[in-house]
């Protein structure tokens, strides 16, 4: 594999890293109560977190190299019409990854990637996920979790001029452009295929999982194993429902901009790829802000570090 192909695979891994991992859990997740309400004060009503994505490995001669900027935005307590979804109140989380300010990344594989999810206000059920890359990939995918019919439906951008439009109720919930017009109105969207059947009381997506973990009391949570420190949660990735195993490790002090911070360290482990670990460090305070994230990557390691907080 040549160096260019390796670099492109690395950037693809970076996108996957920010939104997904294959991990495992057992059927105990079925027993999570749907009506559980988590403290909304854990995350501010409107919050924006800024990060820098870096890589160190054989492709950079074992030197840390910055690849992209990441912005994560949350808006909690929004309202939607009853007929659009089963729920009328929801939270919206969005991640934007861009290589715009990184010359080598722009030359080899420019990325403008947006991942947006809508979750019910109890942080139990993902309702809608959008993934859009306006860079080289030029892709737009929509995943709808139809809880009324216990099914998942996948839609994608189509090159066909005769592609069918999405249902209006669904389209009104999608990403908007600068004119507040849903992007799906401007491009043909076609039905791709049905996904996995919904067989769990709780299903989140990788991004909303991060906010769910921020709402957990790791000391008193009854669904967290007291002996192993493990929490098990079903997650939808693309059109597949995968099973995540989240493990709380020992608390750790890490440096952020030269300042020592007390953190809660978590590990997510895959059943099929047990050596492919994903780590998250949350600030040990009421916000539980993700301070750092890290994961094994092709020929090295990817890392995301917090740069700035806006609340």
Image (tube, rainbow, N blue to C red):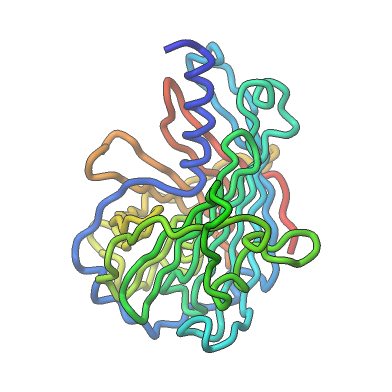
Residue 228: name its quadrant. bottom left
Which quadrant of the rendered structure holds the C terminus? Answer: bottom right
Coordinates of residue 63 in the picture (x, y in percent): 58, 17
Quarter of the image where the N terminus is located: top left
Residue at far right of view: 179
* Image coords of residue 134 (percent x, y): 65, 43
Relative vertical location of residue 200 with respect to residue 233 in this rendering, above or below:
below
Q: Is residue 92 left or right of residue 176?
A: left
Depth order, front residue of 250/192: 192
**Residue 210 placement (x, y as % from top left):** 49, 58
Can residue 210 be spotted in the picture? no
Location of residue 297 with respect to 264 vertically, above or below: above
Q: How many marks?
A: 0
Quarter of the image holding residue 200? bottom left
Residue at point 39%, 85% (across, down)? 35
> What residue appears at the point 47 percent right and 27 percent down from the top-left corner?
9
Query: Is 273 on the left or on the right of 153, as rendered?
Result: left
- Viewer-closest of 9 and 185: 185
Q: Which one is nearer the viewer's eye here, 72 or 171?
A: 171
Q: What residue is at 36 percent from the left and 59 percent from the top?
A: 235
The spot of residue 262 in percent (x, y) is 55, 51
* Residue at 41% over, 74% down: 124
Name, please, the residue furthest toward the front: 162
Q: Is residue 2 above or below residue 306?
A: above
Asked if residue 304 lies left or right of residue 240, the reply is right
Say if 1 sits above or below 286 in the image. above
Residue that extends furthest to the left in the rendered view of this protein: 27
**Residue 127 visible (yes or no):** yes
């Amino acid at each position: 594999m040549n160096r260019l192909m390796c670099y492109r695979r690395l950037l693809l891994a970076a996108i996957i890293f920010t939104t997904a991992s294959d991990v495992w859990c057992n059927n105990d997740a079925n027993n999570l109560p749907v009506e559980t309400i988590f403290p909304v004060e854990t995350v501010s009503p409107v919050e924006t977190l800024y990060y820098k994505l870096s890589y160190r490995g054989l492709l950079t001669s074992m030197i840390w190299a910055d690849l992209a900027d990441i912005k994560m935005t949350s808006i909690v307590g929004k309202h939607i019409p009853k007929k659009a979804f089963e729920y009328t109140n929801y939270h919206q989380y969005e991640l934007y990854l861009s290589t715009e300010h990184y010359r080598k990344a722009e030359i080899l594989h420019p990325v403008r990637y947006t991942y947006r999810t809508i979750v019910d206000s109890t942080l139990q059920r993902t309702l809608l996920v959008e993934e859009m890359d306006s860079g080289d990939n030029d892709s737009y995918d929509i995943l709808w979790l139809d809880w009324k019919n216990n099914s998942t439906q996948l839609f994608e951008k189509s090159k066909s001029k005769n592609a069918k439009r999405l249902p209006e109720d669904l389209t009104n919930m999608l990403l908007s452009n600068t004119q507040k017009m849903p992007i799906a109105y401007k491009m043909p969207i076609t039905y791709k295929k049905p996904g996995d059947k919904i067989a769990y009381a709780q299903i989140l997506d990788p991004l909303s999982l991060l906010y769910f973990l921020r709402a957990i009391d790791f000391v008193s949570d009854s669904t967290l194993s007291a002996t192993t420190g493990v929490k098990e949660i079903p997650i939808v990735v693309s059109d597949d429902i995968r099973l995540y195993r989240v493990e709380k490790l020992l608390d750790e002090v890490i440096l952020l901009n030269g300042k020592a911070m007390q953190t809660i360290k978590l590990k997510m482990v895959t059943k099929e790829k047990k050596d492919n670990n994903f780590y998250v460090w949350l600030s040990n305070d009421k916000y539980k802000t993700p301070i750092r994230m890290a994961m094994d990557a092709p020929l090295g390691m990817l890392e995301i570090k917090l740069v700035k907080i806006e609340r």
